Image: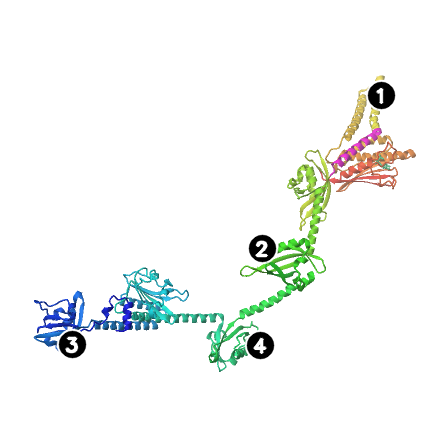
Amino acid sequence: MTSGDKLFGRLLGRSSVQALNPPARIPDAGLHLHLDHQGHVVQVSNALRQQLAQHPTGDTRPLLRDMLHAGSALSIEGIPADWQRHSLDLDFHGADGNVLHSRGWVEPEGEGWLLRLLDISDLLTGRESARQREQSHQLACQMSEQLRVCSLTRLPQVFNEHLNSLAQRWRIPCVALALLDQQDQGWVVYSQYNAHDAPQLWQPGQRLGTSLDSLNGNTPLGLNVIQGLREHPRLHGLFADVDGFLVPYRDSQGVAAWLLCGLYQGQPGVSDRDWLNLTAALAAPLLDRLREQRHHQQLERLEALQGLLGTGWWELLPGCDEIHLAPQLMRSLSMEDAPNKQLLGDWLELIHPSDRQELNSRFQDLQNLGKPLLSNVRLQRQDTHQNPIWYRVQGQVLGAGDNRRWIGFMLDVSDVKNQQLQAAAAHARLDNLIASSPAVIYVQRYVNGALHPTFFSDSLLPLLGWTLAECIHVTAVEWIHPQDRDTYFERTRTLLREGSVRSRYRMRDKQGHYHWLLDEAKLLRDDLGLPVEAVGLWLDVTEATLAAQHVKESEERYRILVEDSPAMICRYRPDLTLTFGNTPLANYLECTPEQLAGVNLGQWLSDEQRSAFVKRISQLSPEFPVSTAEINLQLPGREHAWWVWSDRGVFDEQGQLQEIQAVGRDNTEVRRSQQQLTQSAKMATLGEMATGLAHEINQPLNVMRMAIANVLKRLSNGDVQEDYLTDKLQRIDAQVQRAARVVDHMRVFGRRSEVEQQPFDPAQAVEGTVSLLGEGLRGKGVDLRITAADFSVQVKGHADQLEQVLINLVVNARDALLGKREKNRDFQPWIALHCEHDSRHMRIWVEDNAGGIDARLLERIFEPFFTTKPIGVGTGLGLSVSYGIVQNMGGWLSVANGEQGARFCVELPVVGEG
Ligand code: ADP
């Protein structure tokens, strides 16, 4: 027994080291059995006698055979004399149920035989353990072998089977192999087995942490087989508090695997070394195969990567000027069929001539000077129209001296390269564009919270006259208009805070002129979100800004004008709904300007006024957008109001009326005074007519007086016939009616005109005039020639006012005629009243033969108070009032000198029937 074995015994914690050691050789060692000739045991002597279960006594002499185990009992047949010269191996029933293994021989002694025996238990135990070691060695070899040859896919299964047979062979209830995980350096259960009646302590793939590392190398020789876990509290968790047994496997790196045995204490007769060997037999091939698998996978990944990237390695072969290329590279160069070792010169033929020489010289530098190679080259292509194929060739020296190798790779960078070229072209175009753009593009660099200009596009010079160099040394603030500097500071703060900004400020150019600039800037940030630079754009908006300012100012002026204007100003839609009205208008309508929007103007107009208003508005057109009229309204709290109203239509592109802008002036007072004037003029006319009227009334009175006198005369003569009387009375009645008509008409004429104009037949006015003046004129010897109107048209206004006009004209003519006759008694005065009309107008001509009006006075006779008549006779109002009346009716009063005298014309618009 070696000292190593003794050590194992101690490590295994065997209770009795003594039991494994050979017994001390003492003279009376062994066992002496004295036999009779039949084989009965007569006496037992020497040291081992105590170990026997059975001893002969005085009465009983047991047969030797009966003291033996069945197996060895068979090995002795017959009687002791037959056993001479044989070596006998006998197993006795020992004390306490043990077996006493012994070897010996018989020799004659006195009357009987002496059987001399020695204890051979140790010898047998040694043999048994050798056998077991042999077995476990065989098993280990078998396992190793199978693990090495099985396919990688079956490896886990084969391994588990071996774990299984190991467990069964050494009766281990739970067993697992833990491997060191490459990634997190902890331990992981690779495979596990548990007997069907044992708990499953571990799962395959279970992570065990690093607690096993605490055992690493803590026992002499590094053979730290751990039996029982009492001294290792850290491992209790690992074994779920059951007893356990741990065997490490070490490789050059240290412990690489642990065999974990749960609910297990070890096996007598199996040494630590056996366990270590067994574990090594399992773990070593497994780890090799796993490493092989990883290597294989890595290789596959590398190949796939090379294939995907269109890349591959190359190696320059020493001494022979040859290059060795990876199969993937050959494929991506479409050279599958060529040998993958080629002469460098041949291979360089693949490269485009313009890059070939450079690459060759770089290969030389790599080989001769060890200078790392990096070059982008194009491949030689048949079809020159296609985009070139670009490869990046990179290489380096590995090793030194004679072991030097020159290795590198080639990578297809066509995509990147072509994109680079396109980007460069696009960049050039963009540069061009930026330079020719009317806007200035600038870049400001962010340094510690401040922005410093680093770039301006070339358009800066034409715009502001500054060059980039001048800009970089001056802060932009110095050029900003002093009033806009706050805006500029705020712009920078906003830009830094929010990432983009748009602002407008004035900047001084080299000549000292200020430009309005529209500044739009954006802040660019790096991956961490920190500001890097601001990119912005200046647009010269001076003209637009000034124009906008002017518009604003003029808008303001107009607003003030509209607001403060005493005139009524409003806007309304074609349906007369107001959209805006100023304060004066609101005041008239007794509301606030705000309340005006949405109100309909028509509500203050009579039906007739409204329809006339709408009709007038509908006649507006883009060519004739303006119309002016006097409108009559019924305003709240007032009887009537007259507004002089001027409308201007606003049209869309199709010529549709969208809106009307109107300016109005209250004309009520003027209207009133005009009315009063007309009235007083009318009264004056009446007064002037008094003589004529007296005559007018006198005439029937005279007729009546004569008729009455005649009747009275006849009555006094008694010569009164009924017919005569009737005739006279009828004549008197006719004269009464005639006088009554004149008086009636005077009353009507003297009345105030109606407020609103009415359509009427102008013939009425002609008749009225004649009825009032006809007799008087005749009485004065003036011939009144009437060209009776054979038509019936309507004009709009007041019949009494038109009559007033005609009376004025006739009375003026009469005065002129009488004046002329005073100088010439033979003069035959006449006044002609003549009517005519066309589709749109009717005209009444009043002509006399009084010689006309002095040409110098013609322009003045319509002026108020212009008269040539003596004071107290003429008022000078007749023609001016008449002019106003005709104008009010939409007509025109004019005068010209005719052949014999003045010729007045009253022209009036004809209105539709009704
Ligand atoms: P008045 O009759 O009170 O003078 P008018 O305004 O009616 O005032 O007339 C103004 C002037 O025009 C008259 O004074 C007269 O000189 C002149 N006039 C008007 N009608 C005639 C006429 N038919 N012939 C000549 N002169 C006339």
Sequence-wise first label, 4 or 3: 3
Calculate the distance from the C-alpha at mark 1 to the C-alpha at mark 4: 151 Å
> In the image shown, does 32 or 252 lie closer to the viewer?
32
Does residue 589 appear left or right of residue 319 in this picture? right
Which residue lies under the disc numbered 3?
A: 87
Calculate the distance from the C-alpha at mark 3 to the C-alpha at mark 2: 109 Å
Disc 4 to disc 3: CB gap under 8 Å:
no
Calculate the distance from the C-alpha at mark 2 to the C-alpha at mark 1: 121 Å
Which residue lies under the disc numbered 2?
A: 497
- In what quadrant of the picture does the C terminus appear? top right
Q: In the rendering, at what x and y percent does residue 442 appear? A: 63, 61
The residue drawn where x is 54% and y is 61% is 527
Q: Amino acid at mark 1?
A: Ala
Q: Amino acid at mark 3?
A: Ser
The tally of labels here is 4
Q: In the rendering, at what x and y percent does residue 81 appear? A: 10, 76
Q: In the rendering, at what x and y percent does residue 473 appear? A: 66, 62
**To which quarter of the image does residue 789 belong?**
top right
Does the stretch in magenta take in 139? no
The tag on residue 354 is 4
